[in-house]
Amino acid sequence: MINTLQEKIGITLENYMFKVESGKIRELALAIGDLKDEYLNGKKILPTFPTVIDFWDGGKSTMELLSLNKKKVLHGEQEYEYLIEIKPGDLITVQSVLENAFTKASMDFFVVKREYFNEKGEKVLISRSTVIERH
């Protein structure tokens, strides 16, 4: 089993683009109850807004690419490293790679690294999410 997991490290996911729209910023603010004016009027993104970007990728899901059983998958951890402010109106391109995979306590852990670039080609954010598949 270790070899199979190790072989998945380095798999790249399909790149995708996302336009940061004021309406999506507002929707997230309302959904999580963070009613600051700057979010409701779409003038500033919430710290967790990249999650919205991730759900709009339009391609194959991480679970599909890694052949994971949806019924056994958990979201383990999420981290964001902001490099440059993402602003409403930005066109973001996301590049993703499986950075690590390992087994621990009868579960497989997959660490997906995403890099987000604005339309100027500047790297604005790095995120890492851990997906866990129970055995």
Image (cartoon, rainbow, N blue to C red):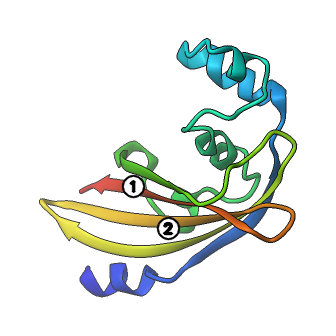
Q: Give percent across and percent down for residue 37.
A: 70, 14
- Label 1: few (<14), some (14–19) or many (≥20) C-alpha neighbours in 10 Å: many
- Label 2: few (<14), some (14–19) or many (≥20) C-alpha neighbours in 10 Å: some
Residue 33 shown left or right of residue 93 in the figure: left
Residue drawn at 54 percent across, 18 percent down:
32
Residue drawn at 42 percent across, 53 percent down:
69
The residue singled out by tag 1 in the image is 131
Quadrant showing the N terminus: bottom left
Q: Give percent across and percent down for residue 108.
A: 28, 64
Residue 119 shown left or right of residue 48 in the figure: right
* Disc 2 residue type (three-letter): Leu
* Disc 1 residue type (three-letter): Val
Residue drawn at 33 percent across, 54 percent down:
132
Question: Residue 66 — which label?
Answer: 2
Q: Quadrant of residue 9?
A: bottom left
Residue 119 shown left or right of residue 82 in the figure: right
Q: Where 69 falls versus 45 (above or below)?
A: below
Q: Are dots 2 and 1 in contact, CB under 8 Å? A: yes
